[in-house]
Image (cartoon, coloured by chain):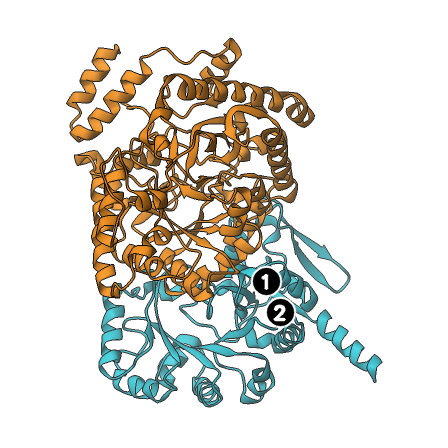
Amino acid sequence: MTLQERLSQITRDPTLSPKQKSNFLALEADSSLPYVAVSEPVKQAMESGIIGDMFEGHAPFKPRYVLPDYAKYLQQGSEYLELSPAQNLDEALIALTIIYHHVPSVTNIPVFLGQLDEILLPFCQGLDTESLYRKLKLFWIMLDRTLPDAFMHVNIGPTDNIVCRTILRIDAELKQIAPNLTFMYDPQVTPDELLQVATTNICECSKPHIANYPMHANAYDQRGFGIVSCYNSLPLAGGANTLVRLNLKEVALKAKDINDFFDNILPQYCQLTYELINARCSFLHKESNFFNSFLVTEGLIEESRFAPMFGIFGMAEAVNILQGNPELTESHAEKPSPHYGHHQAANELGHKISKALDTIVKSTPVDYGYNGRALLHSQGGISLDKDVTPGVRIPYGTEPNPIAHIKALAEHHQYYTSGISDILTIDETVKSNPQAMFQLCKGALNLGFREFTANVASNDLVRVTGYMVKLSDIARFKEVGSRTNTTGLGAEAAVNTKILERQPRVVAHEMAPSYAK
Amino acid sequence: MKWRQATRSNANLNKVAIVNQIIPFSCVDGPGSRLVIFLQGCNFNCKNCHNPHTIDLCDSCGDCVPTCPKKALTLIADDNNNRVIWDESLCSQCDICLSVCPKQSTPKTQQYSVREILDLIRSQVHFINGVTVSGGEASLQLPFIIALFRAMQSSPDLSHLSCMIDSNGSLSLNGWQQVLPFIQGAMIDLKAWQQDTHHYITGRGNHRIFSTLKMLAELGKLYEVRLLHIPRVSDFDSEVDAVAHYLTQLPSNVRVKLNAFQHHGVTGEALMWPSCTEAQMRQLANDLTQRGVNNLILPDIYL
């Protein structure tokens, strides 16, 4: 199909809104430009699906994820936006609503909405509980209706405060797809009872994620960090300039044996991954003029706080290939099997691969990075992935019981500084026993989980590749189209990755793929 | 004296149970997240049993051995002592062995000592709030249960875990007296209200169950009463006045859990009985609520 025909088809699509059409048209235009200059081996690795740029576009003119310092913005106002400093909660909420429309990301919708309790608390003095609830509830509804993308992410906790509690109350009540929500947990600071409120919410609507606050905080400097999109942990006042991901399954297929994998093939493809990272960052930082933005001149982001994310996926397949395991089927799930997720030797090989990646990523300089380095990321899959499992996850439908699941993967978590998306599916009996969810969560964090994300099997809201969609929306989507951008991805992911075949399922997802018809 | 204590403690740790299954994470067998040990063997013979292969102990007749498509079963024949050995790593869980078993049993049981169970609990102690023994009928292996719970409570790293029993309530009062010091609570099934109905469903009378309920309630150890509603077979709906009156006399913190009869796993004539719909369940719940029964717990799922 010619470019013109594709564009024409998008303009006529009966299921997309005008805004969604504009987005796809822009993506097509970007993809029609020449790709940033890369070597022949990189081109080949990209064409054969070993490394990929997650459809970020051929000419990266904006960073993948941007995490502005919203606290600073509220305190100082903005010359560019002609706003004086916020004086009360109404002004603060309006100021945030305004700036969200000026924060770019790979999806054009901001992926980070701020550590909202911390930044709003100074404006809540003297406000009664009911007024706060009413104002935040309207704000929450506004977010879901005007920025309908489950990748945009609010952070709350680890302290116990009225904004945090009110947001948890509203989120459980409204059960919206957007925004995504992370609750920071710090055993030194967070009362158990507050964590219990958060884990009870998970039983209601599969949100929030629970982040291991000390573990994330230790990975970054005093200025802090944020959790954005799907479980990406990144420097605050910075972000990710790009995400390039490496398909470990394909890498394993190239290796003669385990030694060849570690000694030759893996380092070789990591090298190509770095070449692509540097090529993409070079365009963004040197040619796109993005860093002339008011976000930079007003001090809300700093160029030096952007890091490339070094993503990996297909760990399960890589381990099974390297060990020569037979093809995995669901009947392996509840019995001893040699497969990744089920057998200690397989799990340990996985941990060894993660450690090797960690060593490479911590020792390889990049042209534009956080402290001169990229950040390792266990990438949660996109809706076009087939026959390859997201990140370091255990393949869908073959997961062992939740405790064995956590124990199999905990060891990986220390290595994935910029996030590791793993999702536990818990059967719906947990709904009437939130204490069980609480205990499972504490157990996971105690064992070194960076993030605890659970999906309750019967909830209408499910995570598809890490963002939320409504099951009922997926059924309706094909008929009439969806108001939310991510449901389209959910429907595509549901078909391609079999995520709904067995149980409401969860893959993680970072990115709108191109128009696929 | 010291020596004798050590020997007794070792003997306790070496006590062995015949285990049908262990579930590391359950949300439905007591408060919070629990490791559940399902012991093999039951003294009831409920027509509606949804896992009848837990009723009898395997007598190693060997009938199942040649039917296994994966050759996971072998018969070891000593002079006077046959044993069927199950190799879990070969098993595909097709359950043909269960369907050919001339008794209501399974070759897929395992023996666990108290010591082995303690190791298992320790390996996941951060994830659970407690341990529940269920069955089959758990109380048939009472010495094992007492040894296990005693050992947990005398171990500083495990003593915070709650210990519960899930039972059909047939244990004698004397038996309960022995185990009560070691449990935080029990979940008791009441299968029917009238003696005749109970006999028809389970093959046994229900006097002992009422005695058990009375004793546990008085001593504050009754966590939950479970009523299985089988429309047109069980009698909680037709006897709702008496049932409700009885339930309201129990301590107010006792959970009353209503279970809906489903066909899953059931064999024999009970498959002819209608399964309980959500509407029927709600009807019974309403009838009980109107008569003052609070603390009702309804099913999460109707299959």
Crowd band around label 2 with a 10 angstrom C-alpha radius: few (<14), some (14–19), many (20+) = some
Determine whether label 2 and label 1 are within 8 Å by CB. yes
Residue A101 image position (x, y, % from top left)? 25, 36
**Tag shown at residue B125:** 1
Helix, strand or loop status at disc 2: loop
Q: Are marks 2 and 1 on the same chain?
A: yes
Q: Identity of the amino acid at label 2?
A: Leu
Of all chains, the one bearing label 1 is B
Picture quarter containing residue A298? top left
Give the left or right position of residue A197, taking residue A95 as reference. Answer: right
Question: Whole-percent x and y of residue A458?
Answer: 34, 53
Nearest to N terminus: mark 2 or mark 1: 1
Query: Are there few (<14), some (14-19), or many (20+) residues within 10 Å of tag 1?
Result: many
Q: Is residue A67 left or right of residue B88?
A: left
- Color used for chain A? orange
Q: Which mark is residue A281?
A: none
- Residue at 37%, 24% (x, y): give it: A55
Q: Give the chain ID for the cyan colour.
A: B
Residue type at mark 1 is: Val
- Spatial CA span between label 2 and label 1: 7 Å
Mark 2 = which residue? B158
Q: Position of residue A422 (x, y in %)?
A: 47, 44
Residues A149 and A215: in front is: A215
Looking at the figure, which quarter contains the N terminus of chain B?
A: bottom right
Residue at 84%, 79% in the rendered image: B3
The answer to whether B14 appears left or right of B28 in the picture is: right
Q: Toward the viewer: A294 or A114?
A: A294
Which percent across, then down, holds residue A220? Answer: 52, 42
